[in-house]
């Protein structure tokens, strides 16, 4: 799936190749945890659709359009202590989180009128909010697992790893299910690289001073966590250094995030027998049993086969396990367990995890309030039970139909634009249109809600709830293996402030959470909506034809439908974007990785072109005078300002640096200007002379 902002352990492993979301907000990026206690709650208002207060009229829009459209945003939106940055997604997230909290607070009170789902979401929230009880219990809720870890031998690692992975613990490698890239009608088992504590492999291999310092800080963090779990400080330091050395071996065998953008890099069908041969002498069967995999794994190569995301990783992992002493491996699992459940463990462990993953990595000085954290946790674990109530209360009845009309307008714009592309031949054009016409549109919420009947939730067992909910979702996912694909299933919860494209499903998805100001308002003028949510719709649609999506056909299969000549021309055009964005400096001495961000940059650029075409066509059909000024701006000007204001931001340097190093999305301010300089309609809208910074003599365009 491809998302405008990017998201079980296995989902994160495959995110770059299988989920393309519109954005990765500061909220989403930071794994921050909230403070204890019940601080007074601040009330948040929906963001304005057209933020005139953010516009800096002293800036020439032809010189720096981001500064023109968003020049006062940072001053108007200082970064709260509990965030690593502020942007439009953060603003809506706050509104949504408050709404979710209102729902959860109501249902946290016991009563006979609650439905089964209302009881589950209310009790989960109540247990999460009871930090005093969590502190009093100490490590007791996970002591049985800690005891297992302390006693495990190397021969027992597969069984224990399966047990831990079923609870969401990122240990050694990843296992899960996915649609088969080559046959999208099948759901198959998959294995992949994993097991790292730092964000991705290059954090272990880069040699700069900041990278070395971060690894030292990681060792100190690991030392502290082990000490809090009962080790002596001296032993904890030894174990922490050994854990870093062990994870470095895993990292060196891992593919980079950039390489993994190519679906072919992570698609290697193997028989189960061949996979087992690659991990000798490890026996995979105990792992499969305790992770609750099906008894048979029907896959691409027959009744027992898997998709291997990185075949070279597993022999290296086995060698690393063989070379490590059992004390190191036990300490490694102990830290992974504490990391997974730290928010439901004593405050000292929770705070230490935040100190590293929140403050050091993302520059966030304070944890979020507990009510925000717990509301988000319920959305993550019981998202469709909570989402059903959210939709009933906060999703306007006509928003779905009006959004669908915009989607159809933008799809029609792409259909018309395909006819005008001078670089695409007729054979490829026909197949591109075939794929376009097969794209399914999902808006707001699922047609059928998920069944949580078998999930047990207690009002007094926060950690147990987290364990059971994670295991429930693990079992639900693995149970798909060998079953028919459910094309109605959603990959995001209804309250999520995001959107995504899924290449194996060939569908675009817009949860109810993003269909509100400042992205969408059924009462706003045409230019605003098409500049805001229209650009998001165009973004997701274009993902079906970016350098990743273009490798999948209309049925969701990884299949080459291009002529050789057209593919060469397509790659030349995407190379233009790679070079263009690779020249942008994100923060300090760190430049944007043009290859890592290629898919998102392609979607930003192409999506904006399509949204503008659709806006002009809809205005003509509705008899709207685009030259008429509102608030002093013409329709086209309002359209482009609305788009740029999607990306108004105020971010901490640590947050931007971490994003550039790990995330396939460019930083927000670069997403705005990077797309604007390639827009054929922008110069005319603002009267920019040729060869000004925002209207260069030459630019890049793929779609």
Image (cartoon, rainbow, N blue to C red):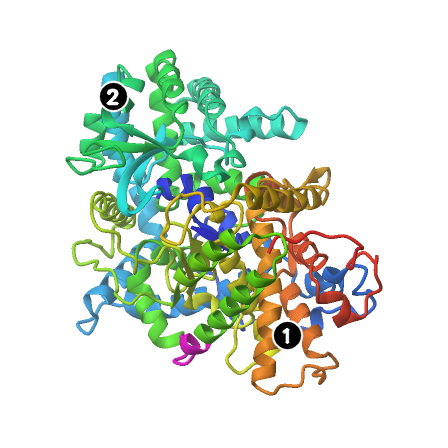
Left or right: 243 in relation to 85: left
Looking at the rendered structure, which numbered label has been put on residue 191?
none
Is 398 magenta? The answer is yes
Q: Position of residue 97 (x, y in %)?
A: 44, 64
Q: Is residue 596 visible?
A: yes
Q: Position of residue 646 (x, y in %)?
A: 60, 64
Say which of 621 and 288 sits in front: 621
| Of labels 1 and 2, the one closer to you | 1
Q: Which residue is mark 1?
A: 50
Is 557 magenta? The answer is no
Left or right: 75 in relation to 434: right
Q: Is residue 145 visible?
A: no
Q: Quadrant of residue 574?
A: top right
Which range of residues does the magenta coloring cover?
395-402
Residue drawn at point x = 61 percent, y = 48 percent? 666
Looking at the rendered structure, which numbered label has been put on residue 152?
2
């Amino acid at each position: 799936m491809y998302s405008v902002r990017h998201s079980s352990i296995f989902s994160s492993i495959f995110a770059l190749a299988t989920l393309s979301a519109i954005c990765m907000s500061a909220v989403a990026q930071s794994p921050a945890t909230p403070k204890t206690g019940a601080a007074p709650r601040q009330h948040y208002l929906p963001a304005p659709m057209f933020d005139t207060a953010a516009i800096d009229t002293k800036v020439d829009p032809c010189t720096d359009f981001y500064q023109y459209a968003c020049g006062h945003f940072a001053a108007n939106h200082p970064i709260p202590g509990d965030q690593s940055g502020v942007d439009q997604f953060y603003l809506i997230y706050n509104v949504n989180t408050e709404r979710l909290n209102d729902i959860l607070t109501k249902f946290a009170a016991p009563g006979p009128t609650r439905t089964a789902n209302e009881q589950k979401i209310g009790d989960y929230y109540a247990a999460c909010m009871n930090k005093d009880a969590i502190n009093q219990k100490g490590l007791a809720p996970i002591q049985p697992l800690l005891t297992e870890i302390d006693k495990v031998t190397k021969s027992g690692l597969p069984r224990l790893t399966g047990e831990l992975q079923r609870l969401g613990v990122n240990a050694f490698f990843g296992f899960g299910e996915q649609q088969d890239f080559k046959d999208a009608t099948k759901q198959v088992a998959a294995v992949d690289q994993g097991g790292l504590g730092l964000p991705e492999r290059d954090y272990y291999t880069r040699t700069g001073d900041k990278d070395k310092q971060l690894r030292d800080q990681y060792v100190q963090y690991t030392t502290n966590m082990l000490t809090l779990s009962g080790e002596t400080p001296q032993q904890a330091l030894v174990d922490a250094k050994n854990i870093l050395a062990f994870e470095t071996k895993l990292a060196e065998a891992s593919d980079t995030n950039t390489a993994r953008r190519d679906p072919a890099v992570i698609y290697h069908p193997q028989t189960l027998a061949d996979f087992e041969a690659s991990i000798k002498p490890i026996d995979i069967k105990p792992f499969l049993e305790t992770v609750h995999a099906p008894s048979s794994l029907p896959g691409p190569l027959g009744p027992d086969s898997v998709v291997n995301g990185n075949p070279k990783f597993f022999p290296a992992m086995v060698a690393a396990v063989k070379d490590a002493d059992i004390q190191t491996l036990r300490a490694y699992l102990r830290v992974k367990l504490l990391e997974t459940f730290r928010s439901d463990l004593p405050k000292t462990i929770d705070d230490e995890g935040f100190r590293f993953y929140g403050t050091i990595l993302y520059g966030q000085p304070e944890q979020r309030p507990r009510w925000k954290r717990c509301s988000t946790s319920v959305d993550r674990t019981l998202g469709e039970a909570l989402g059903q109530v959210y939709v009933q209360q906060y999703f306007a009845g006509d928003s779905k139909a009006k959004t669908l009309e915009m989607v159809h307008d933008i799809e029609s714009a792409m259909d018309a634009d395909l006819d005008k592309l001078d670089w695409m031949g007729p054979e490829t054009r026909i197949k591109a249109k075939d794929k376009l016409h097969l794209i399914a549109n999902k808006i707001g919420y699922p047609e059928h809600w998920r069944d949580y009947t078998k999930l047990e939730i207690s009002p007094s067992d926060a950690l147990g709830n987290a364990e059971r909910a994670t295991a429930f979702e693990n079992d639900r996912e693995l149970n798909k293996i060998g079953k028919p694909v459910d094309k109605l299933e959603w990959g995001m919860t209804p309250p999520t402030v995001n959107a995504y494209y899924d290449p194996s499903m060939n569908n675009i998805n817009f949860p109810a959470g993003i269909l509100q100001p400042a992205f969408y308002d059924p009462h706003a003028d045409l230019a605003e909506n098409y500049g805001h949510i229209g650009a998001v719709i165009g973004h997701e649609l274009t993902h079906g034809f970016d350098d990743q999506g273009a490798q999948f056909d209309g049925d969701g299969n990884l299949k080459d439908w291009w002529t050789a000549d057209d593919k060469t021309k397509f790659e030349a055009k995407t190379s233009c974007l790679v070079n263009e964005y690779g020249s942008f400096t994100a923060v300090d001495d760190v430049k944007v990785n043009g290859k890592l961000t290629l898919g998102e940059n392609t979607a930003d650029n192409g999506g904006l072109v399509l949204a503008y075409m659709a806006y002009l066509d809809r205005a003509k059909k509705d008899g709207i005078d685009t030259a008429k000024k509102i608030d002093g701006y013409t329709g086209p000007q309002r359209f482009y300002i609305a788009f740029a204001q999607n990306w108004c931001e105020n971010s901490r340097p640590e947050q931007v640096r971490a994003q550039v190093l790990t995330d396939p999305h460019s930083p927000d301010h670069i997403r705005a200007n990077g797309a604007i300089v390639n827009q054929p309609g922008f110069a005319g809208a603002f009267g920019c002379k040729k060869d000004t910074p925002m209207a260069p003599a030459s630019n890049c365009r793929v779609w």
